[in-house]
Amino acid sequence: MMRQHGTRRNSLVPLVLVLSALLLFSLNQIRRQNSILSLDKQSVQQQDVAKLIIRSNSTTSTPVAAPTLTEATTSTSATIATSTGTGSNNSSSSSSTNTTMIHDDYVIHHELISPKSTADLILNTSSSDYKWVGKAWIPPQGVPVFTPSQIRAYFTKHNILILGDSTSR
Amino acid sequence: MINAKDLNDVKLKEIDEAQTLNLNKDGKSTSCADFGDRKIVHLAGRNYIACINLEQEKQKEGGGEVVGADKHDNIMNNSTTMTTTKKHVTFFDHGILYCYKTLSWMWRDDNTDDLAGPRGPRPSGSSWTMNSNVQIFEKDYDMIIIAMGIWELSQLSTCTMKTHPNSTVSSRLAVALDRIHRNTPNSLRVVFRTSAFDTRYTDNDQSIRDANTVARYFFEEMRQNASFPEIRDKDNTDHHDSSDHEPSFMNKNNDFLLVDWGAVMDKRSFNVDRITGDHPAHYGIEARTLFIQQLMHELVKADLMKTM
C-alpha cells in the first residue's frame, strides 16, 4: 500500500510541474498583455502630445514663460520627434530654427500665430501695412479686425467731428 | 456702421446706401441746428454739416464712472423714484472741407496768418489764444478726423483760389499740418487721412502722391522728435530764429495721427484692379471698411502708447 501510495505521489510530480509551468506561462501572458496595454496607452498619450507639438520656424518669437519640449518631456522627446515626422532632435540647442514648445496640455505657439501680444503687434505696425487679396483687405499679421460692436463702443465714448470731402463719408 | 440695427449682421445697405452717404451732400444741412447744443453751426461752412447723437446707456443709480466723453456733460436723465438711467450722448458729426488751404485757415494762428510757410510748433508752456474755430473744436469734440485731398487733384482751380503764389498741393498741405500741430490744444486728438486717387487722373496724379509723401515725412519727423528729443532740440536750434530759444516742440505724438489710406488704396485704384464706386473719385465699400479698420488700428495704437 505504502509502495502504491509512493508510486502515486511520484506520478503526480510531473502533473504538478506541468500545472506550475502552465500557471507561470499564464501569469507571464497576463503580465505581457498588461505591458502591451500599457505601451498602447503610452503610445496614445504620446500621439496626443505629438498632436500638441507645433514646430515653429521662428526663433525670435519664443515665449519666455513656456517650457520647451526638452524641459517638459525629455523622456518622450525622441518618440515625439519621430511621430511628427521630423526626425530631428528636439533637445538641440536654443539656436535651432525649430523650437518646439508645449505648456501643460495646451498649445501656446503655432507658426501661423504670433506669440507676441496683440498690443505689441498693433504698436509695431501701422495703417500702411495693410495688404490685399482681391478686393479684401488683410490686416498686418496678428492685428485683429475690429468688430462693429468694438467700433461703435469706441466711438460712443468720444465726441467726434469728421472733416472732409465726399471720400470721408 | 454706427447706425446699424444688428451689429452681428450689418447689412450692406446700412453702410453703403446713397441716403446715408449723401447725408450732407451738395449743401444739404442735416439736423445740427435741431440739436441746439452744437457749436459747429457757428463754424464757417455750416450749411454743409451733418450731426448725429450717439446714445449710450452708461449707468444706473449710484456712482460709477461714465467712461469717455468726459469733456461734456451730454447726459439725458430719465429719472424715476428708484432708478436713474442716464443716457450718455456723444457727438458724431460731419463737416464738408475740400481744400488744404481751408484746413490751414481752420487752424490758423489767432493773429493774422500772413506767413505762407510752416511756422513750427509753439514753445511748450507759452501762452496763446485759440482761434474761434479751434475753440469750437475744443469745446465740443475730443477727436477730429480729417479725410480729404482729392479736390486738390480733381478741382484744382477751387483749391488754388486766393492761395499764395507758387504754392503747390504739397506746400499747402505742409502749412495745414503745421497749423494743426501748432494750434491744437492738448485735449483734442486729430487724425489725418491721406488721399487716394481719381481715375480721371491716372498717371497724372503726382501732385497728390507728393502731398501724401509730405504727410508721411511730417508724421515720421514728429515721431522721431518725440523718440529722440536730443535730435529734436538740435534741429530746433538749427532751423529756428535766434529769438526762438525755448523748447519748441509740443508733443502730440499720441494725439496727431496719420492714417495712410492713400498708400494702401494705391494698389486698388487703377485699371482692372480699381475698387469702383459711384464716381471716378469714389471707391466701393471695401475702401470704406479699410479706412475704418486703419483708423481703429491707429487709435488703439495711440491709446496704447499713452499708457506706456
Image: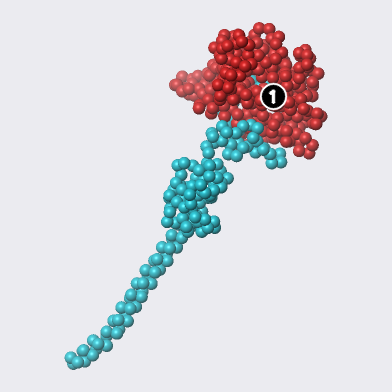
Residue A68 in sight in this render: yes
- In the figure, the shade used to draw chain B is red
Location of residue B36 by image quarter: top right
Residue B263 point in image, percent of width and height: 69, 31
- Chain identifier for the cyan-coloured part of the image: A
Residue drawn at x 25%, y 87% as measured from the top left = A10
SS at mark 1? Answer: helix
Along the line of sight, which residue is nearer the eye, B279 or B259?
A: B259
Label 1: chain letter: B
Residue A127 point in image, percent of width and height: 64, 31
Along the line of sight, which residue is nearer the eye, A24 or B34?
A: A24
Residue drawn at x 18%, y 91% as measured from the top left = A2
Residue B4 point in image, percent of width and height: 64, 31
Identify the residue position indicated by label 1 in the image: B214
Is residue A114 depicted above or below A4 in this figure? above
The amino acid type found where label 1 is placed reads Val
Residue drawn at x 31%, y 78% as measured from the top left = A20
Residue A62 as seen in the image, left or right of residue B20:
left
Is residue B202 depicted above or below B64 in this figure? below
Residue B230 point in image, percent of width and height: 55, 21
